[in-house]
Image (spheres, rainbow, N blue to C red):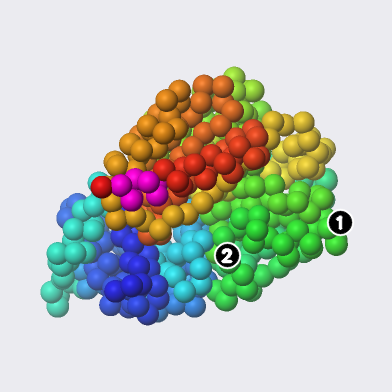
Amino acid sequence: MDAPLIISPSGIRGIVGLTVTPELAARYGAAFGSFIRERGPVADGGYVLVGRDSRTSGAFLAEAAAAGLCAAGVDARLSGIGPTPTHLLAVKDDESALGGLIVTASHNPVEWNGLKLAGPDGLFVTPVQGERITQLFEAGPSYADWSSPGRVAAHPGVVEHHIERLLALDLVATDAIRAARPQVVVDCVHGAGALVMPELLRRLGAEVDGIGLTADGRFPRNPEPTPENLEELCSRVRETGADVGFAVDPDSDRLAIVDESGQAIGEDWTLALAAEYVLEHRRGSVVTNLSSSQVIEDVALDAGVPFHRSAVGEARVAAMMVETEAVIGGEGNGGVMLPDLNLTRDAPLAGALVLSLCASRGARVGELLADRRHYRMVKRKIARPAVAMEKIFGTLQASLGSDAVSDVTDGLRLSWPDRSEWLHVRPSGTEPILRVIVESIDHDRAESLATEAEDCVARAVGSP
């Protein structure tokens, strides 16, 4: 089948009606239920929370997944539409929750959907757990008999719970934000963030103007919040004279920022600014992944705190944050993770922290970035080649990496000791592609290094 079905340790993703169907959702839900029952007896009142983002296929896939859980003998509770971090926080904060199943394809285009799995701690399942669930899915889950099926019930209130928990955080400078009364334009792209972001911003005292605030899943543009997709938000910020623009992806775990001039500043700055604010109040390490910008590392270096890079993926960042006792972490795609709340990417949290920084400094985002060291990042995609990754990485290493530091934790990352540039090539876990990410202090050099990397891949594929 030409349509992709991507199965990874953290979940499953594909094209609705082709590779992602109600039958697949039910089987995957049953596999998760079987996994839960493998761990031991299910306590009375225990349940799996089944939430979704706003995609048009979300309702029937959530109900199918819930049916699969029940068929495996595990109760399911449907929490409706909400951001992924909203559902995960609800799991973490309820001791009766056995785990979470979130129906979402995150930033993927409108025709996609998928299912992500979380444990009772409100974190995505570990790679080892994910592999076992995949085995159960592929081999055939274990079903309960007539006497012990699970039951489905509604689980309302998760959105309000998330907003209240954010407002209660000591780190959020609520009084300072209310005093500043920032004007914020928020673009929720008709995603689940429309149920949280505007209300949170209003309760923080912001004046809110919005784009795409109907959570119906009918994305009017490519929903990934990258600069090239934010033209309408940039224009709206300029037209209204707003202080800042925020854009989130459909499941609202990533936040992108547009400064007061109407310029999209790049998602890596989201974590950098949030980390700068948190490090003013907490001393500790910062964690991000191998593909994230050095602007985040610069913040940690300036603060004199340890900085660590993990493999790409929220679960891997979370694991390293626990290991290093990090005070903040996340990914350069706009995902901010705060131990004070939950070790998951959370766009509403990121927005609250960035507004807290601006309010406490009495400055807007563009003013805060005026004197920073800036880099040029180039991201390219190559159709996944039908050759061994080791061959591709060997060619890259031989051609480009003679004086570079190599990291093979996740694909191949080459970085140069003077911190002038780096290159990361890795197979995507969410699309059938090879990702090429380059960053340099020289804009032209970033483009040329990315082209050199693509040429190396082509040579590796074409050579015997």
**Looking at the image, which residue is at 64% across and 52% down?**
256
Q: Which mark is residue 241?
A: 1
Disc 2: which residue: 223
Q: Which mark is residue 205?
A: none
Say whether residue 293 is magenta: no
Q: Position of residue 39 (x, y in %)?
A: 19, 52
**Looking at the image, which residue is at 21% across and 64% down?**
137
Q: Which residues are magenta?
A: 457-463
Q: Is residue 96 left or right of residue 345?
A: left
Residues 348 and 14: in front is 14
Is disc 2 placed on a helix, strand or loop?
loop
Q: Position of residue 189 (x, y in %)?
A: 62, 67
Q: Position of residue 59 (x, y in %)?
A: 44, 77
Can you tell which quarter of the image residue 354 is in?
Answer: top right
Is disc 1 placed on a helix, strand or loop?
loop
Q: Position of residue 54 (x, y in %)?
A: 52, 71
Residues 69 and 365: in front is 365
Residues 62 and 445: in front is 445
